[in-house]
Image: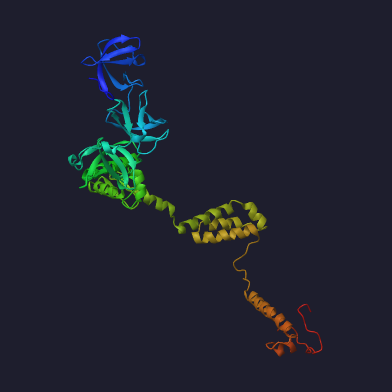
Amino acid sequence: MLHLGKFNTLEIERESPHGLYLTDEIGNEVLLPNKFVTEEMEFGEDIEVFLYKDSEGRNVATTEQPKLQVGGIALLEVFDVNEIGAFMEWGVEKHLLIPFRNQGRRLSPGDETLVYMYLDEETHRLVGTTKLMKYMDGDPDKLKVGAGAELMMWHATTLGYTAIINGNMVGLVYQDDIYEDIWPGDIKHGFIKRVREDGKIDLSLRPFGYNKVTDESQKILDYLEKNGGTMEFTDKSNPERISRTFRMSKKVFKKALGLLYKQKHVVLEKDCTRLATIEPVNKINSAPLKAVQAPSKASEAPKRAKESFSKSNKSPKHTQEGSKGIKDTPKRSNATSEKSGDSAWKRNDASKEIIEGPIKREDTPKKSNATPKKSADTAWKREDAPKEIIEGPIKREDTPKEIIEAPLVSKDAPKQNVEAPKKTDRPIWPED
């Protein structure tokens, strides 16, 4: 018997100008056009072909591979739309018609949507529809929690993504369980998570319970081995980064990481996680680095003093230019180089003085610091003195009359009879 919309195994019976005629077990014939005939085909051989009706209503066989059969669902693209409906590309030369009455929403060329194909009882032609719920006649009570199922992703909702279960039921994958990009028509291997009392089915794209943790733990181990045995992720890492990298929630990640820790596969550190077989990086050559990076300052000072002092001994030319007529200077410099580090440091300073100018002996009397202090005091007094003289002629309440009548006289100056300025004279300004 010939089955439209499905694959049939038929025998090559005879040849005609239009192609080969194939027959079933009861003698029904169908034409295989010449464009599908190959040289390998022989009379009496059984071949597998797909049957449909052409534009004139005749049964036709093809070796093309359609995207779906009768009772099946597939993601199809709209090729064209006219006054009858939308014509879909489905892998066969003749396009599949979806009448307007079978469209959940009006389709346009280029649109992609899930299509269910059936055999119309009146016209005996293959017809498509986007109204899928009427064909979802599976029994949810036969499903077992935790059992695997083939899922075809349908469309997104506010709660997650709807999926067709084994081609005859609809369930929902919640958004919290989705850690990968999903598109309509994708085929996924999922699991039955829960069957509600109202018949609604909750789905999961990953196994749950202990099996789920085991699978996710293996994924973490694979990531560690791929990245040299260490990773920057810990149980305190950002949930979004965990989701992007491992495609799992932080809750599942922590359970999987904890399982690996209990099994002593990994070592948890403050800022990273590493395999138990990998040594921590911060312990390698840590002591030698500290010894090299922190030399004692006490050992550096004498060394630098000796080096600078030896350089001064190797340049007698500068010594002679700095202090002419002193012949015993190099001998004294060599003798002092054998002394302790502190004396060498002092001699180093002495050599610098020789290069710059005449030798400064230790017994040279140091200049007294009393003079600068005295000059500073005098400057302070002189700074105030003009202010007092300037303020004198301006008759202010806070101006002392004694300053006007007796100007400032230095202690070392000889005593002279200075008359007090008369009231009629002009004031004494700093320029005078």
The reply, left or right, for residue 73 in relation to residue 343 is left
Front residue of 41 and 251 = 41
Q: Is residue 172 visible?
A: yes
Name of the residue lying farthest toward the front = 122
Q: How is the image coloured?
A: rainbow
26 to 385, vertically: above or below: above
* Label total for image: 0
46 to 421, vertically: above or below: above
Residue 154 location (% of width, % of height): 32, 39
Residue 407 location (% of width, % of height): 74, 86
Name of the residue lying farthest toward the right = 424
The reply, left or right, for residue 149 in relation to residue 429 is left
Residue 418 location (% of width, % of height): 78, 88
Q: Is residue 279 visible?
A: no
- Dividing the picture into quadrants, the one containing residue 150 is top left
344 to 208, vertically: above or below: below
Look at 24% across and 47% down and name the residue there. Answer: 259
Look at 67% across and 76% down and name the residue there. Answer: 375
353 to 119, vertically: above or below: below
Front residue of 258 and 283 = 258
Front residue of 329 and 203 = 203
The reply, left or right, for residue 339 in relation to residue 261 is right
Front residue of 154 and 414 = 154
Residue 170 location (% of width, % of height): 26, 40
